[in-house]
Amino acid sequence: MSTPDSTTAAAILPLVGGPANVLTVAHCMTRLRLGLRDPGLVDERGLRALPAVLGLVADGGSYQIVLGPGTVARVTPAFETLLANAPAPPAPHGTGPAATADRLALRGAELKAARARRNATPLKLFLRRIADVFVPLIPALIGCGVIAGLNGLLVNLGVLSGLTPALTAIAAGFMALIAVFVGHNTAKVFGGTPVLGGAVAAVVVYAGVAKVTVLGVTLAPGQGGVLGALAAALLGTYVEKWCRRWVPPALDVLVTPTLTVLLTGLVTLYALMYAAGELSAAIGTAAAWLLSATGALAGLVLGALFLPLVMLGLHQALVPIHTTLIEQQGYTVLLPVLAMAGAGQVGAALAVYVRLRHDTSLRTTIRSALPAGLLGVGEPLIYGVSLPLGRPFVTACAGGAAGGAFIGFFSMLGDHVGSTAIGPSGLALFPLLSGDRGLAVTAAIYAGGLLTGYAVGFAATYFFGLGGIRDSGLDGGADGGLGGGPLDGPEDRRAERTAV
């Protein structure tokens, strides 16, 4: 029986070039990420016209369709099922003109895809693959983080003391073994055997490493954390691939797993755990110093730059840093600062809504996207409002900078605001807040940052972000004059507004 999600998947597939054009499928919190043979076959106007599609991002490494949280997790399996059941395309054959044209078209698509791969820088591709390791872990991090926050509240209130040990075990179990999941996903993303990646990463958290001495120093279970697990699984993947090339097929099933686990395990124990431990400690020290010593300035810069990172899809590369801080300190102090970018976006959208009161189409888009924006999902407002208009995207960044500076200022005073998990932001982050001055103070500072971001984003957009846009509605034809907005003219802007 057809469902809305399967209907959406069925509508998307032909618009991205059909099954033969789809090489890989993945998803993050809000986006369906497709590796395409030929991105030029995508019908962007058709995609934008779909009710479930909130925006599109083409970054050279993948084609990303913004569907929103929840929706993307349901549409992706339906999309994968369609691909699995699609008939294989017939190979070009024959000697007539049609067959020759088919071969040339296929070769042209391959050349175009190869050119796209060359244009993607190694650093960006590597960061995307690292993000692909950690993004699938976010739901568990959110669930365990909310349970940890609830447990902390019960402990502070002194109620249900018999339940709190059970909640502690439930919340902490995943974090105690997160290295294994990181190792599994790393091997999967980088082309190894997932269970072998999990096996070598499990060495990092095994209690027995406390009996291992390296250069006179006894190792500690968990030393190196997720970074050690990531490094171990990466090394294991390369060792496995090397073995596959050189080990005779008859011995492969016995020798390759053994050498992969043995060689990688020894290097992990005698080198990677120590090195990753030092790097993890440095990340924690740097984050604490950054906000304690230069809090207002650091918050301003981080809050201003986060929206562009979201626009490019590179914000997920920060997940390993957040995860490392949560492992070390119990919360990440960076996420609440970065969440201020979403507050600036909400303020900017509200200013557009107030100023362009006769533009019914744009106001409808804002009304539909604003609830998600308040809960920290920024893509609908980015691709439906601020980015198509151009200048409001910049003023939204100004709001994020102001909110980040607000939280950073209090960090300089010793009032650190952190999140026990990653994923949500905006109003949805309140259940995950933690700090060193109590929940009430932490929540008050975070709320102050949000209000600052809303206010500055609104004011900057209201007074400076809408110059050249006449409040004339769609039938009046908005004038360009946006100073470098991404759309070419009124028709393009009108199509962008109505499509999202």
Image (cartoon, grey):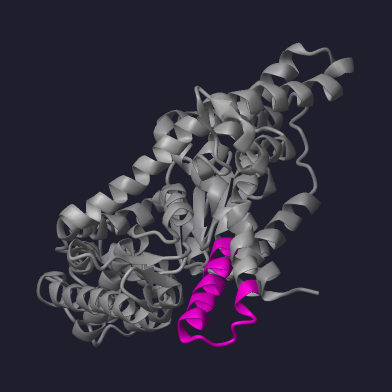
Residue 310: which quarter of the image? Answer: bottom left
| Residue 243 sits above or below residue 348 on the image | above
Image quadrant for the N terminus?
A: bottom right
468 to the left or right of 202: left
96 to the left or right of 369: right
Residue 360: which quarter of the image? Answer: bottom left
85 to the left or right of 211: right
Image quadrant for the C terminus?
A: bottom left
In the rendered image, residue 176, in percent from the top left (x then y), is placed at: 60, 54
Q: Is residue 256 visible?
A: yes
In the rendered image, residue 473, in percent from the top left (x then y), is placed at: 26, 82
Count of picture labels: 0
Residue at screen point 52% across, 44% down = 225
Main SS of residues in magenta: helix
In the rendered image, residue 394, in percent from the top left (x then y), is placed at: 20, 61
Residue 36 is one of the magenta-drawn residues: no
In magenta, the rendered stretch is 139-165
| Residue 61 sits above or below residue 399 on the image | above
Q: Identify which residue, 353 or 372, lies in the foreground.
A: 372
Q: Residue furthest right?
A: 250
Q: Identify which residue, 315 or 282, lies in the foreground.
A: 282
| Residue 136 sits above or below residue 7 on the image | above
Residue at screen point 33% across, 82% down = 440
In the rendered image, residue 220, in percent from the top left (x then y), is placed at: 55, 40
Residue 210: which quarter of the image? Answer: top right
Residue at screen point 71% across, 28% down = 261
Residue 149 is one of the magenta-drawn residues: yes
Q: Is residue 23 visible?
A: no
